[in-house]
Image (cartoon, grey):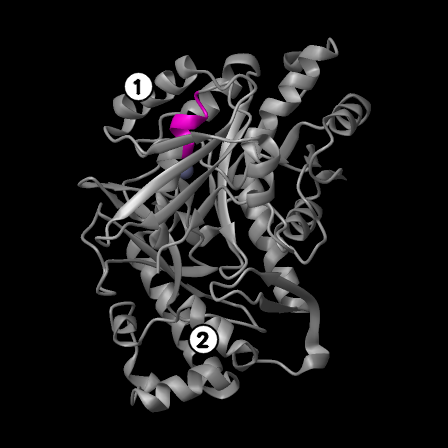
Amino acid sequence: MIPKIEKAPTSEIKSFQEDQLKLLLTYLNKHSVFYKRMFNKHNININDINTLEDLTTIPTTSKDDLQQYNNDFICVPKKEIIDYVTTSGTLGEPVTFALTDNDLKRLAYNEAISFACAGINEDDIIQLMTTIDRRFMAGLAYFLGARELGAGIIRVGNGIPELQWDSILKFKPTYIIVVPSFLLKLIEYAQQNNIDVNASGIKGAICIGESLRNEDFSLNLLATKIKKTWDIELYSTYASTEMNTAFTECEQQQGGHHHPELIIIEILNDEDKPVQEGETGELTITSLGVEAMPLLRFKTGDVVKAHSDACSCGRNTVRLSPVLGRKKQMIKYKGTTLYPPAMHNVLNHFNNIDTYIIEIYQNDIGTDEILLKISAPQPTDTLLQEIKDHFRAKLRVLPKIEFHDKSVIQKLQFPKLSRKPMMVIDKRK
Ligand SMILES: [Zn+2]
């Protein structure tokens, strides 16, 4: 189930996207208060925008724009809206995302082709280990996608290893959708309860929220740890509410495939200019076919690299690297550029760490400092030394490290109304 456009020559994909872009600009110019105002303010005549290159003459849209002018982005009357979701905004207040009936159909299509990309078909049963409610988009998208594909789905929700295993043994799902570090919890529970993970019938896991791979697509420590005990295929999927679109790995596992019928992507440098091929930059998206809240040149804040060499799965579309970090969380530390995921990777190496939080702040002279607050059952000097050595070996820099009580760290991880644990606190201005 590979959509025809995804196997087309790149020139055909480009002209297809340019046609879609023109439709979008006409739509925004008619229905979007925010973009109409922006076109006027910057004297943009949408008839002058004909190619993907022309797109770069339009200013980008930021997360702050979305938050400040939230309602001005909604292009449909209220009665057309079916589903409301929210994301955490950068300025504190959550940002509302609205979806029409057609948007939900588009979301179902998006997730169905993403599942198909990872080799799932109508004979499979998927166990959903993420939240489907609490104003999240992802869980609902997975449900709709499974339905569109004709696959079975078991909505267990997140956490509770006992209930997850009960469902796996009872319904025999073939795939699971999961935050990869939770797989370690499932393995632990299985080991304690004499369940053979490799006889469970699970073929693969669609992994969200955390990276599985290093920049060269080799498995990172977390994924290596999982595969050592549980021999299943691990597929990364990367998505966000704002994009309404997922980038999921195919069986080659060489980055998440771009679906050109759903989204236009740009990789931009600090000056909002496209980076050279193969360079890292901020993923910037223009959503296609969205009715309620289409976005034009929206800066996601995620730093990625695009790969455009051919993929042997037959799709002729760009693949995105693992997210290397959040643009805003880039740390300049002792001459090294660093993102929190690299530190997660170092810390995941240790079985004898309970949990941790990374604090980033500025010192008196205005440069970045990193403080790791770690909780461990046995916070010994030996462990501290091992952690330090591992940081020096892997990242060549050593942040400040403190041991704290688990309860202290958990309190920091779950501020008011937070739906998922925060692993990073950025206190810089
Ligand atoms: Zn592929």
Left/right of residue 287 with respect to residue 420 in the rendered view? left
Q: Is residue 346 magenta?
A: yes
Query: Residue 78: x and y, percent?
Result: 69, 80
How many dots with numbers?
A: 2
Query: Residue 48: x and y, percent?
Result: 28, 83
Q: Residue at x 25, y 52 (%)?
A: 364
Left/right of residue 92 with respect to residue 317 in the rendered view? right
How dense is the environment of label 2, judged by Cα within 10 Å: few (below 14), some, or many (20 and up)? many
- Identity, as a three-letter code, of the amino acid under mark 1: Asp
- Identity, as a three-letter code, of the amino acid under mark 2: Leu
Query: For residue 389, which numbered disc appears in the image?
Result: 1
Q: Residue at x 72, y 53 (%)?
A: 133
Q: Residue at x 50, y 72 (%)?
A: 67
Q: Quadrant of ligand 1?
A: top left
**To which residue does mark 2 refer?**
24
Q: Residue at x 47, y 81 (%)?
A: 28
Q: Nearer the viewer, residue 360 or 245?
A: 360
Split into 4 quadrants, where in the image is the C terminus? bottom left
How dense is the environment of label 1, judged by Cα within 10 Å: few (below 14), some, or many (20 and up)? some
Can you see residue 107?
yes
What is the span of residues highlighted in magenta in the rendered image? 344-349
Give the CA distance from mark 2 to mark 1.
52 Å
Q: Is residue 395 magenta?
A: no
Q: Nearer the viewer, residue 164 or 409?
A: 409
User: In terms of sequence position, does the residue under pointer 2 or pointer 1 come before the other?
Assistant: 2
Q: Is mark 2 within 8 Å of ligand 1?
A: no
Which-is-in-front pick, marks 2 and 1? 1
Can you see residue 307?
no
Query: Residue 399: x and y, percent?
Result: 32, 34
* Picture quadrant of residue 15: bottom left
Query: For residue 292, which numbered disc appears in the image?
Result: none
